[in-house]
């Protein structure tokens, strides 16, 4: 029960932690390199976590009703919508925040960036958090599970948050250019993964047609190995993705690569990161 | 234990058809759409998977190759469970004393293990595709 609880909570926490780390690196970069009057407070993280936790509690409270919707595939539809909404926010962030239109309005830009990032993190926490609440709430209340489940949960959460902190400090200790480039690269994988997860859920609900699997790498890198879990949390690794999933994943990457955010991280002429 | 594959009874479908034949011509197209929907719905066979005492019944689900199947998971335990399978690429929460539906397949012949993520020690099963 204890080890199971560690793994389950770690799995959910690590995804959100890595996402928060990448977005915090952006906050850090913007603070460093943009106009001095550009005030992007780090407080958006606290706000989004707080709203996310409340949202997760509400989602798990209404899970019985939601799961019965659409002939018992309500959960899939709900979670796929969360993924697609997050993808939309990631695209708005990548396309509008660095755009010339907002260049004169530094406060507006800061607010818009904070709005996008708050939304993305909040949605991630609603999705991941509700599963933790279902697990802890449903299991810990029964039998003599309480201590091992809650203790395991705390340890899992601790490892997940630590991994996020490691990624954050690893990235901000690189040169500004490389920190920016790797973060944009990770954001493109995050975008691809959001689209791919939405496709998987809608296929599971039979709202999207079945497509054959694109490849099977389960012998090279099994999904239930430690490396497999980490890769799943970081880039959404799956050993047997469907062709439609892979296509949407690639589309997500392309969306970020054609965005102004990507052009700023790989400037054609000057290497002035985040020049406004 | 083996799973039973059942589909909507043809007599019920016939009754519905007869009823609709009496309606005016105007609604013919709508009826056609409805019949098509019923036919499409009936075309996906359904199997039941029961969770009780953190065990799956039946623990072995046999399904034909190349066939999409609707799996109705009924949780008779008061605790929630999460149906998970790496091989099937499926993950779904089933609330305590609740039920849910997932679609699997069409699949290649082979064995596809699944487990309950909340009670993985006991809740184990396998889908055998023939």
Image (cartoon, coloured by chain):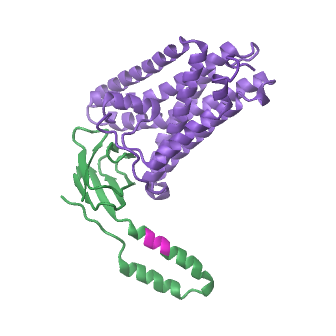
Chain colours: A purple, B green
What is the residue that sits farthest to the front in this orientation? A269
Quadrant assignment, res A260 = top right
* Residue B17 placement (x, y as % from top left): 47, 83
Outermost left residue: B1
Question: Residue A240 lies in magenta, yes or no?
Answer: no
Q: Is residue B130 visible?
A: yes
At horizontal 18% and vertical 58% (from top left) the residue drawn is B1
Q: Position of residue A37 (x, y in %)?
A: 76, 15
Q: Is residue A271 above or below residue A4?
A: above
Using the rendered image of the protein, determine whether residue A90 is visible from the camera's viewpoint.
no
Q: Residue at x 31, y 35 (%)?
A: A222
Report the span colored magenta.
B36-40
Residue A156: percent from left, percent from top: 37, 24
Q: Nearer the viewer, residue A161 or A65?
A: A161
Is A32 rendered above or below residue A259? above
Rendered residue at 67%/27% (across/down): A113
Quadrant, the C terminus of chain B: bottom left
> How many discs appear?
0
Could you tell me residue B37's position as x and y percent?
A: 49, 70
Q: Main secondary structure of the magenta part?
A: helix
Of residues A42 and B52, which is closer to you in this image? A42
Give the left or right position of residue B95, taking residue A84 as reference.
left
Q: Residue at x 53, y 11 (%)?
A: A173
Residue B38 among those drawn in magenta: yes
Q: Based on the displayed image, in which of its 4 quarters is residue A82 positioned? A: top right
């Amino acid at each position: 029960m204890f080890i199971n609880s560690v793994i389950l909570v770690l799995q959910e926490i690590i995804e959100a932690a890595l996402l928060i780390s990448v977005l915090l690196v952006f906050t850090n970069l913007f603070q460093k390199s943009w106009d001095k009057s550009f005030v992007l407070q780090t407080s958006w993280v606290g706000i989004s976590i707080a709203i996310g936790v409340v949202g997760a509690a509400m989602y798990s409270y209404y899970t019985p009703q939601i799961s019965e919707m659409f002939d018992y595939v309500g959960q899939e539809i709900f979670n796929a919508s969360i993924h697609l909404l997050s993808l939309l926010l990631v695209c708005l962030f990548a396309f509008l925040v660095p755009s010339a239109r907002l260049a004169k309005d530094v406060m507006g830009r800061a607010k818009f960036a904070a709005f996008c990032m708050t939304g993305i993190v909040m949605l991630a926490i609603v999705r991941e958090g509700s599963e933790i609440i279902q697990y802890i709430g449903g299991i810990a209340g029964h039998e003599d599970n309480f201590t091992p489940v809650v203790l395991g949960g705390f340890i899992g959460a601790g490892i997940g948050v630590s991994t996020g902190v490691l990624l954050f400090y690893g990235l901000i200790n690189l040169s500004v250019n490389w920190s920016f480039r790797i973060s944009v690269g990770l954001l493109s994988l995050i975008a691809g993964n959001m689209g791919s997860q939405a496709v998987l859920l809608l296929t599971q609900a039979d709202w999207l047609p079945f497509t054959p699997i694109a490849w099977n790498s389960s012998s090279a890198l099994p999904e239930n190995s430690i490396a497999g879990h980490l890769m799943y949390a970081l880039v959404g690794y799956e050993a047997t993705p469907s062709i439609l999933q892979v296509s949407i994943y690639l589309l997500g990457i392309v969306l970020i690569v054609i965005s102004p955010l990507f052009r700023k991280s790989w400037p054609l002429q000057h290497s002035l990161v985040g020049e406004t | 234990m083996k799973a039973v594959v059942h589909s909507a009874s043809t007599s019920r479908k016939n009754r519905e058809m007869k009823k609709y034949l009496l309606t005016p011509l105007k609604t013919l197209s709508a009826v056609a759409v409805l019949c098509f929907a019923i036919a499409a719905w009936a075309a996906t066979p359904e199997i039941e998977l029961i969770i009780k005492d953190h065990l799956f019944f039946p623990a072995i689900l046999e399904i034909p190759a190349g066939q999409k199947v609707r799996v109705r998971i009924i949780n008779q335990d008061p605790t929630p469970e999460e149906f998970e399978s790496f091989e099937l690429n499926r993950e779904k929460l089933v609330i305590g004393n609740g039920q849910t539906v997932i679609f699997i397949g069409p699949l290649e012949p082979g064995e596809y293990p699944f487990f309950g993520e909340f009670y993985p020690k006991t809740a184990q099963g396998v889908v055998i595709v023939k």
